Image (spheres, grey):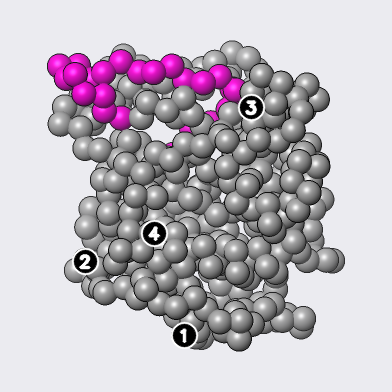
Amino acid sequence: MPFLPPHLLRTALLAGAAFGLALPAHAAAPTEAELATFEPSKTPNNDGIDYSIWDEAMKNIVISMGPSLREGAPRPDPSFGSRRQYGHVSRYRLEGTRVMFSFLDKDVIASFTEYRKDLENTANIVDIQALSRNEQLAYWINLHNVALVEQLANAWPVRQPRELKIDGVPLDDARFITVEGVKLSLRDIREKIVYRHWNDPLVMYGFWRGEIGGPSLQREAFNAENVARLLARGATDFVNSLRGTQDGGGTLQVSEFYREAAPFFFPNFEADLRAHLARYADEKTAAILAQTRGADPVVSEYDIADLEGGVREPTVTNITTDGMSKSFRIPQAMAALLKERETKFQEIIRRGRTGTVTMTNVATPGAEGEPAEVE
């Protein structure tokens, strides 16, 4: 099987790589003829794409906050010596994953742009549409997430990703991605390519949105072998979290992201969504589904899913490990968040939840006859 590796994060991290070029944010929406280019072939080949370098990057810049305990985090105390509240104050701050944007230097950030361009160029070398459906799905999810990490890293500090604009166009709708000569936005990749050609809502959990309130950014790159497993993991994490589902006084409250996906996956919104949620619900979530009515998509959290809250804090503190102070200094609010995270993990262990095993016999969404994975 031939592999065509993009070249992110080379040894020198592409010091001085071109960055900040004019972006075609105002490009017209892709036509139906252009979108037809991305329709999956009915006779896929055995080619593959190697994402091992992006996989390594994810393992180094993404931190998991662990599974939800379905307990909202209390409002933290202000930083010592300051009346201003730095860091995350969200009740969902101990859920999902966080990206360490504040630790990235300009060369690493530039390497993200280089990698996004490498992924774009890969489509000029290999026929993306002729890949297996697993391979295609992994390509589109990785390209979407690489592009979003790139833009947020370049703009950081930014409090909320939806505040960011490229050439006056909101980040989600700016067409700064070019695949086979077609200008695409993040929304185009999700809705006009993947949601159009994959018919299982599981795919929505692969797309990171940069916000605490959305699905987690996985600490692995997607590939043909793990895409079903990672999507199932993302669904299980999100469905069984406060940011995914809540009991709102007898009414089922769900994430706003489900409303966005409704035209594609939940035409009969309440019934279809509840059936989907039940598929991944754990015992607590199943009880919530049983004791509530309706499905109200009102749960949201727009703050950036980073460690520092999208704002540079002027005060720092030493990190301690096992009571011993280390020389590495980080913002006070970040240190407090990491301490909360440690306390949460201790509580998870105390409750006997030392790990999660996910088993699925679901074929890659939208495909038939392709093997899934068991974790």
Q: CA distance from mark 1 to mark 3?
A: 43 Å
Q: Pinpoint residue 177: horizontal percent, then vertical percent.
A: 43, 72
Give the quadrant of the N terminus.
bottom right
The residue under label 1 is 181
Lower sequence index among marks 1 and 3: 1
Of mark 1 and mark 2, the one earlier in the sequence is 2
Marks 2 and 4, how far apart in space? 26 Å
Query: Does dot 2 land on a helix, a strand or a loop?
Result: loop
Kindly indicate whether the residue at mark 4 contacts the one at mark 2 (C-beta within 8 angstroms): no
Residue in the picture at 70% in, 26% down = 251
Q: Earlier in the sequence, mark 2 or mark 4?
A: 2
Q: Please, what is the three-letter code of the amino acid marked with disc 1? A: Gly
Residue linked to disc 4: 171
Dominant secondary structure, magenta: loop
Q: Which residue is mark 3?
A: 246
Instruction: Say which quadrant the C terminus sits in.
Output: top right
Q: Where does label 2 land, which residue?
A: 15
Contact? badges 1 and 2 (CB < 8 Å): no
Side (left or right) of 359 relative to 174: right
Note whether 241 is above or below 44 in the view shown: above
In the image, residue 27 sits, relative to residue 306, either above or below, namely below
Q: Residue 105: percent from the left, percent from the top?
A: 23, 53
Q: CA distance from mark 4 to mark 1?
A: 20 Å
- Specify the amino acid type for callout 3: Gln
